[in-house]
Image (spheres, helix red, strand yellow):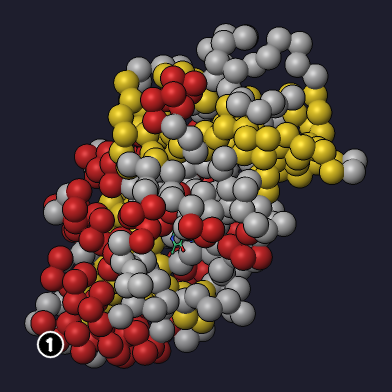
Amino acid sequence: MNSSRPFLHPDAGSPLACDGVRLDTLAKKYGTPLYVYSANQILERLRLFTQAFQPVPHLVCYAVKANSSLAILKLLAKHGAGFDIVSGGELERVLRVSQEAAERVVFSGVGKTAPEMDLALRSGILLFNVESAGELELLAERASKLRIRARVSLRVNPDVFAETHPYISTGLREHKFGIDIREARKVYKSAARQKYLEPYGVSVHIGSQIRSADPFGAAAERIARLVQELRADGLSIRVVDVGGGLGIEYHREHSFDPEQKVRQYASALLKALRPLKELQLLLEPGRFIVAQAGALLTRVLYVKKNGKKTFVITDAAMNDLIRPALYQAHHEIIPVVPRKGARKRTVDVVGPVCETGDFFARDRSMPELQPGDLAAILDAGAYGLSLSSNYNSRPRPAEVLVEGTRHRLIRKRETIDDLLAAEMP
Ligand code: LLP
């Protein structure tokens, strides 16, 4: 079993498997499109963080938005993870799998509502990552109404450039996220005057799919200076939440050593935060934990030619996995059953949705696929199902969790009745 790549052909010529389970077996049993996840890989990635940050007190708060399936949250909760949530709905999910995990929850997001704050206060979460002065005011009001003290951290915007897709970069002054780092001291002082608010930490999150450790180090340096100033102001700042954002490698031909990546990330952060004593570090990785643990299994419906182009039409579509359409993201696509001597063809792999943007690959040279063949779209465990929709009235796929050589359904395929249940004709 290869911990860095759970989706492999066990040997040349045999069908693609997820750990010890063949994907053609899963397709037969559960149908397609189907999300398949490796539990081993998820736990292995969690372990890489725990190991790399072992020199300091820390807590990994998995970013629920990356993949919020209950079985995955339960698996992570059981292994001690905390959670980064951005809505009341995500908190409900965490509570559904583990009541005691509430004390390991941090609540991020720019638009928290009063009912969401109330739920979080009553559940006794660890920390509110507050993103504006207005939000701080509302939180103070809700906390004093409920007579529950809220531990707060301001999410500061460090004005650090992180090289990634513009839609998932968040750490510049021009973005909607966080509070300008130059304003932070003033806002902390106003928080300290509130009886039911406890200034407890400083948070930052500069974006997602960031592959170099440098921007994380640069942001952490700015945070470290702020913590020192706040402590000099008399505030007892106990935690620094460094957010998530560590990127993975989506291209198979590029080498990728996840253990080394996390080590480099840890060393950039720990170096920048070294001047701070008595500090707990919070981490919010999402993608790095689940992306490579998951694949979207799909069946080829048709192959057609239009002019010079060949289109492979699959039963999965952009509503199931929107990343290529939304971010021009690259996902490897592998035939599940290799065909002996198969030629390579340059094709577009597309779904049945009525949008030109409904594609998984464009002008990709890959082994020939024929109608009825199965293909796996790799690295789809993060922001796959969690970003899916019912566009074109397509029921969402089922999900299966592979645990070594066993597999189990963790979400049923949606039915048309599920889709229509809330409607009143
Ligand atoms: N913490 C906060 C406050 C966040 O906003 C995010 C992601 C994370 C943690 C986790 O980031 P990660 O470790 O997964 O990079 N849908 C996009 C990614 C959006 C990320 C949004 N925020 C994609 O598919 O690439």
Q: Tell me where residue 399 sits by quadrant.
A: top left
Residue 52, can we see it? Answer: no
Q: Where residue 150 appears, x then y in whole percent?
A: 20, 75
Against 103, residue 71 (above or below) is above
Q: Where residue 142 appears, x then y in whole percent?
A: 19, 85
Toward the left, the furthest residue is 147
Residue 410, can we see it? Answer: yes
Residue drawn at point x = 54 percent, y = 64 percent: 206
Which one is in front, 169 or 306?
Answer: 306
Q: Tell me where residue 422 sits by quadrant.
A: bottom left
Q: Which residue is mark 1?
A: 145
Rendered-image quadrant of the C terminus: bottom left
Which one is in front, 319 or 254?
Answer: 319
Secondary structure of the residue carrying numbered label 1 = helix
Toward the right, the furthest residue is 308
Residue drawn at point x = 66 percent, y = 65 percent: 166
Residue type at mark 1 is Lys
